[in-house]
Amino acid sequence: MIRVVTKQDVDAASKEIESAPRVAIDTEFHAERRYYPKLYLVQVHVPDGTTWLFDPLVPGLLEHAAPALRAVPWLVHGSAYDLPLLHGALGGLTGSLFDTQLAAGLVEAAWPSRLGVLCERWIDTRIPKAATLTDWSRRPLHDAQIRYAADDVLVLPALADALTRALDERGRGALSDAAHAEALAHGAAQPPVDRAWTEIPGAANLTPAGAAVLQELAEWRERVARDADQPATALISNGILLDLARNTPTTANDLRANRRFPKKLIDSWGPDLLECIHAARRRPEWGHPRFPFTHSAAGRRLAFVECAAAAAGAAGQFGWKLAAPPHVREALALLEAPTRADVTAACATPPCATGWRDDLIGDELAAALTGARHLTLVDGEVRLT
């Protein structure tokens, strides 16, 4: 049964949720034209019970149910987007999480996978996607939207059970627990801005001095975008930031001399941009970002680390980008002769909260980096042998 929660039945919904051993939860939101996504629907399915749809636009509704929702374990899919939204809407998070996308990354090489793909693969179930790009801000919700919203949570208990069995069969239950604890910690934290520059396409092609300029500019842009609740690239494009990092203008006249630079931006942000550039230029050489830039030995080592991690993931049946995210790969690439201890340290550096990655991929990475195993082609597949 699917029910859109009203003020009259929010107590009944809260009571059923609070008494459940676990609930499946999902959100619908819009991220366009804003920095912080806007939450428009929260779907909560009680296994063998009701699927409740909470409308965040109804004042007090979610706040009333928040204690009940925080009190039970959650089943989710792709929690990186949902958890920050739910943390703000509910004033906190659950103490126990199972993310089917994360769990799948611990038992199969394809990661991240969409919910529909995992349902077909693990529980032989197809999910209709007719309302994928619907406008969730309009009210009232129509029947197709309600059905679509419910479908995503109805399948989660069966999918979670199938993935739990797979984790147990592979002896990765403890790894899953640690990975989910880390995901909860990240969901409650404000994302850092100091790595925003690394996500700009072309950043790896800069010099260290140019990267320092881009780092200052990208951090400034993130702070302004947060305050204005606008997408960062809507303020100033990535291309303009890269141009500033490459050419490092130092005066307003230098800015105006660049025909690609809109006059409106100079009037609005010119002094701030120049201050970012001057701040970067004042840095000593040791204050430049340490990064495996493309045209460097570290950049070539990064390519090796990524290839080794991908081979390890394919052989061990886990998502290599989950086991070795960018900051882990970069930390290893910056070392000329990494040891097994270096791999352990890299796998536990922030924003990683635990060492579960080292348990999953550490031995294989260390063996490749120390020469104990070699990358080679076997039947057209890259392998560690």
Image (spheres, rainbow, N blue to C red):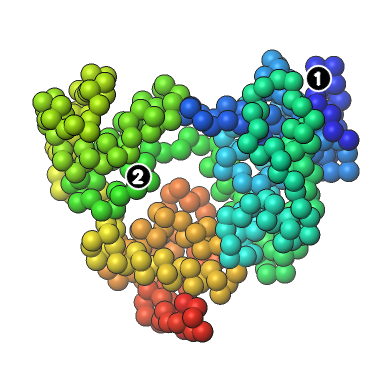
Q: Please state if 184 lies on the left or on the right of 289 as rendered.
A: right
Is 313 rendered above or below residue 227? below
Q: Which of 305 and 132 lies nearest the eye of the viewer?
A: 132
Between disc 2 and disc 1, the foreground one is: 2
* Three-letter amino acid code of the residue under disc 1: Thr
- Residue 250 visible somewhere in the drawing: yes
Residue 68 placement, left or right of 228: right
Disc 1 residue crowd, few under 14, some 14–19, many 20+, Cα 10 Å = some
Residue at figure coordinates x 84%, y 43% from the top left: 47
- Which residue is depicted at the point 40% across and 54% down? 327
Give the percent coordinates (x, y) of residue 354: 52, 54
**Frontmost residue, 350 versus 63:** 63
**Is residue 176 something one can see in this rendering?**
no
Residue 380: percent from left, percent from top: 49, 81
| Residue neighbourhood size for the residue with mark 2, other residues' Cα within 10 Å, grouped as few (<14), some (14–19), many (≥20) | some
Tag 1, which secondary structure?
A: loop
The x, y position of residue 328, in whole percent, is 41, 58
Q: Nearer the viewer, residue 128 or 112?
A: 128
Q: Please give the label number shown on residue 6.
A: 1
Q: Quadrant of the N terminus?
A: top right
Q: What's the amino acid at mark 2?
A: Ile
Whether residue 13 is situated above or below residue 243 in the rendered picture: above
Determine which quarter of the picture holds residue 197.
Answer: top left
Q: Is residue 137 left or right of residue 7?
A: left
Residue appearing at x 36%, y 77% in the figure:
370
Counting residues from the N terminus, which is met first, the one under dot 2 or under dot 1?
1
Q: Which mark is residue 200?
A: 2
Alpha carbon of mark 2 to alpha carbon of mark 1: how far? 44 Å
Q: Quick check: 228 above or below 120? A: above
Q: Image quarter for residue 221? A: top left
